[in-house]
Amino acid sequence: MVINMILDGRTIRDQILENIKNNSINYTITLAIIVIGNNESNRIYANEKIKYCNKIGFNYEIYDFEDMTDTNLENLIKMLNNDPKINGILLQSPIPSHLNFNYFCNLIDSKKDIDGLSINSIYNNYINKPTFLPCSVKGIITLFEKYNIDIKGKNIVIVGKSYIVGKPLYIYLSNNGATTTICDSNTKNLKDICLTKDIIISCCGVPHIIKEDYVKNQAIVIDVGINKIDGKIIGDVDHEKIKNKCSYISPVPGGVGPMTIAMIFSNTYDAYILQHKSN
Amino acid sequence: MVINMILDGRTIRDQILENIKNNSINYTITLAIIVIGNNESNRIYANEKIKYCNKIGFNYEIYDFEDMTDTNLENLIKMLNNDPKINGILLQSPIPSHLNFNYFCNLIDSKKDIDGLSINSIYNNYINKPTFLPCSVKGIITLFEKYNIDIKGKNIVIVGKSYIVGKPLYIYLSNNGATTTICDSNTKNLKDICLTKDIIISCCGVPHIIKEDYVKNQAIVIDVGINKIDGKIIGDVDHEKIKNKCSYISPVPGGVGPMTIAMIFSNTYDAYILQHKSN
């Protein structure tokens, strides 16, 4: 019986990045990041990615604009698609509301779609074909793999149905033999639903929505929430109260967050290999 | 309190077809059906569709082949895509296994994709944009609408995850505020899962998998199963034993089956309107 095992995203991130660094030592891999708007968090995330690019020897190109027209963004994405030295393209969300995020994600060449949000990547996930998955989704799946957590036949609840986590995860998990339930703000009996589940994954961005009495003994709890309260980062899960009931639990910070970072580089590496295999 | 109300697909089918007939009286609408292989059921289904085409005044073109090469099927679909008199294209499943069903569904022009199985239709459903939905899925949704069954906040289980019913339905329902669980053959506690649900939808093709003690009082039960046993059509639901517990129940035959037929013509009519609006 496993009790209170912390899913240590930071250590796994470092192992994965170290592997990527060693495997790519003879390759020139370049990640392009597009940031639009005056969202301070976006700039912090972009800088974080630059830090890891430097650490593992990837090149980067940052396109940072206060605002942008549809035509200019379209031209920029097409230019990056056609540039053979660019291996992965990341359109940092959110973008200003006059730009249609889904539309621009679909413009990204599916071989460079390291965020897994283009129509081809979504369709491939839907038909259970290997593809780029959104980095948080791949991060969670990799956590399961690294800790030998088998999802087949498990009852799993996902709380939150965003395009970048909840929805693609729900499709992946149900494609892979998990009995999956997705909840949203219309759900009336979240506590009862969570209480019967082997695995609870919260990605709705509501601080401490998953409380002690929502979790059955020996459940696995994955916290994808990153909520800032009084300058402190708080997850969706009331970690301190729940951790002693769980078999495995992912902390915030230090769980899915670092795994998401690792998967940006894992996907970019895979994109490089894919592009060079098919040439 | 509603008790034991039969969801009468035949009556609703007839009303819908009558409406389509009246609304399309001045239009020339043509449905193309492709049947490949020696599957007797496919031919029966095709004949059924011809019967209704005649009834409501639609034209039809049946392409019926014992077998076909990839190239010939590709050329046929492209010809139908480019033929302005064809409004809807239906590739009858199953097709011989040497032909990739998903690939050929994706060749169908999304404006003629009345089965809702092309990549664009799937993506639109995923991002919650109005689109062609698979006919059984649209049939179930229309049953809910006709009987004023609100799905928002309801706990719904779907048993079976096929591409033509389970998966697209699961996406549609969760996009529209239902708390949806999808089960498959890996699910360990199907009875317990069903017992807590407001709505049970079975589409796995296992005769009488949904038993009396799987259903809570006042639940709504939708039976999509069409199983032939000793020449008799049997649903996935043990209808006789369950019907007195339900608020609403769909029979087999006479429930989702006729609604699926109605939606083929509803989608073909919509395709005609869409094609003529955008020209």
Image (tube, coloured by chain):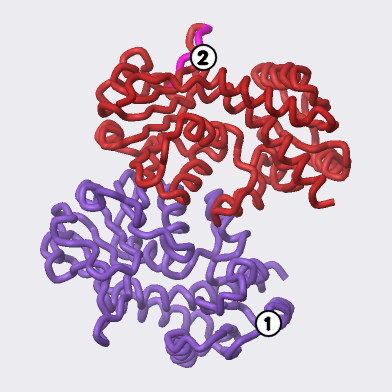
Chain colours: A red, B purple
Comparing B279 with B46, the one in front is B46
Query: Are labels 2 and 1 assigned to the same chain?
Result: no
Q: Is residue B272 visible?
A: no
Q: Chain of mark 1?
A: B
Looking at the magenta stretch, what is its main secondary structure?
strand
At label 2, the amino acid type is: Lys
Q: Is residue B31 above or below residue A88?
A: below
At label 1, the amino acid type is: Thr
**Image-quadrant location for residue B83:** bottom right
Check disc 2 and report the residue beneath it: A228
Q: Give the structural element (helix, strand or loop) at label 1.
A: loop
Residue B161 image offset from top left, x and y in percent: 41, 58
Which residue is rendered at x = 44% and y = 91% of the image?
A: B51
Q: Chain of mark 2?
A: A
Check disc 1 and report the residue beneath it: B69
A117 part of magenta stretch: no
